[in-house]
Image (spheres, rainbow, N blue to C red):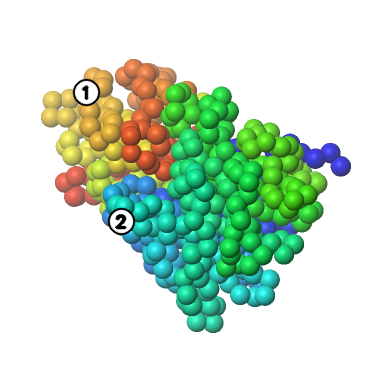
Amino acid sequence: MNRNIIQNPILRGFHPDPSICRVGEDYYIATSTFEWFPGVLIHHSRDLVHWRPLTHALTRQSQLDMEGDLDSGGVWAPCLSYDNGTFYLIYTDVKSRQGAFKDTPNYLVTAPSIEGPWSEPLYLNSSGFDPSLFHDTDGRKWLINMLWDHRTYKNSFAGIVLQEYSTELGQLMGPVLPIYRGTELRLTEGPHLYHKDGWYYLITAEGGTQYDHAVTVARSRNIEGPYETDPSNPVLTSAGDRGLELQKAGHACLVQTHTDEWYMVHLCGRPVKDKYCNLGRETAIQRCRFTKDEWLALEDGGNRPSITVQGPNIPSQPFELPAERDDFNSSELDIRWSTLRVPADDAWLSLKERRGFLRLRGRESMSSMHRQSLVALRQQDFYCSAETEIVFEPEHFQQMAGLIVYYDTKDYVYLRISHDEELGKCLGIVRSKDGVYEDTLCAEVPLRPGASCKLKVVMEREFIQFYYNASDSGWEKIGSSLDISHLSDDFPSYIRFTGTFIGMCVQDLAGTFNAADFDYFEYKQ
């Protein structure tokens, strides 16, 4: 059989912290969604080469209430698993993350099918983040997570802890057992347990989720330890080699295929220049093996991530590619769309009030961590374009709508229609860079009242150029080319975790809910 070649990343754009799960001959990857709703996007594959977005696990506010969650808060590092007819999903909803303290409540939801319905959440603990559920061969289940220590004279990453979970009681029980302190790389997190040939293998992420990120392995004959550290660690890392196309390699999860082959999925980043990764942290995959000494290793030797990987002994099973254009003819949003912190509901978003249009009612500003009217999808390509057509009649300067390139509340670039006392309805560019707002990047362009306007952005690595078409006379540039390096995890000095989104939004800062109608949205590689 001629095996397929896997091209990394397998999930391009903002898809970090992958957790892979096999059920029969189907493979699923769950990834972190942070402050974006719905929570936990799940991709599906039947050959590890071709992947499609399949479903979200957290679709109700009762499962995930993120209103007010800070930037890069929300859902961290979900763990997807399956046992005896039930899917299990563990996740964290991070409520604070800066400074000494981290408030990290961990929850469990279950489902009879990968597409749901997913249950209401069970609260587990808050002692740290990156929780993972392990199903042992004897039927017992164990939760593991990193332990957070806020004391200034201690290592904040205080090691990996283990506690039994009772399905009958629906809660954790028994003692909390510290099982691993980590290696000299420190920042030990992202734990996953596996059982093979009498060994319990503990896979952890270390070195931090930036350029020193790494995958390390330890093992024990007893689930409670002691765990022996692999003398060849790290098993996978990009640290020290800035020439690699895949940087930040770490936070891994293993899968054994139905053809008895081993693979490791992990997060990675691809900088556009210097250290800036505008697409965010992505998901890649590496082929693995177990050595004669029964340690985990990459198939080709070494510990560097490969951009191309030999696929498994499974026939190619591609999926139909998603349409480039969404004409908003469905009564529900396509799976690729996300909203900020809160679910889409009829109070501010409608696909029914004007058929063939997405109607958004203006709410809070781009700085809000509560109720923004914003619908966006992930940027997945270094070279791409996005366009939309908007019908919007602002009555004053506090009303805005348009096409936004968004990282978080501090960093975005926005081609927006508003109203000026002298110009009337007009088009201009606003930007926020590290929280500093600018609205003088170009001269405002007057627009004809009552007419629709097409808006477009062309992205070339770290640069974007906006265009508009107000009279079907062709696209015209507005403003100059803009550097969007600030739309990345790596800008400025503090750590962030998401990636660039492109979408549509409306603001009405007067609180009168003025609406804009979007006729279509087109994203092209």
- Quarter of the image for the C terminus: give it: top right
Task: Please tell me the numbered disc located at residue 127.
Answer: none
Horizontal and vertical percent position of residue 475: 41, 20
Q: Is mark 2 on a helix, strand or loop?
A: loop
Residue under numbered circle 2: 151
State the residue in front, 353 or 299: 299
Q: Mark 2 vs mark 1: give the one in front.
A: 2
425 left or right, relative to 463: left
How crowded pointer 2 is (Cα within 10 Å; few <14, some 14-19, many 20+) is rated as few
Q: In this view, does 238 lie to the left or right of 175?
A: right
Is residue 453 depicted above or below 120 in this figure? above
Residue 412 horizontal/vertical position (percent): 33, 34
> Which residue is at the front of the view, 517 or 206?
206
**Residue positioned 19% across, 44% down in the render:** 509
Name which quarter of the figure residue 431 lies in.
top left
Q: Residues within 10 Å of mark 1 (few under 14, many from 20)?
A: few
User: Which of the two residues, 338 or 397, is positioned nearer the viewer here?
Assistant: 338
Badge number at residue 440: 1
Callout 1, which amino acid? Thr
User: In the figure, is residue 329 to the left or right of 510?
Assistant: right
Give the image location of residue 198, x and y in percent: 72, 64
Q: Earlier in the sequence, mark 2 or mark 1?
A: 2
Residue type, mark 2 in image: Arg
At x 25%, y 43%, the residue is 367
Q: Residue furthest bottom?
A: 168
Q: In this view, does 63 lie to the left or right of 152?
A: right
Q: What element carries label 1?
A: loop
* Residue most extreme to the right: 1
Q: Is any part of residue 124 visible from this angle?
A: yes
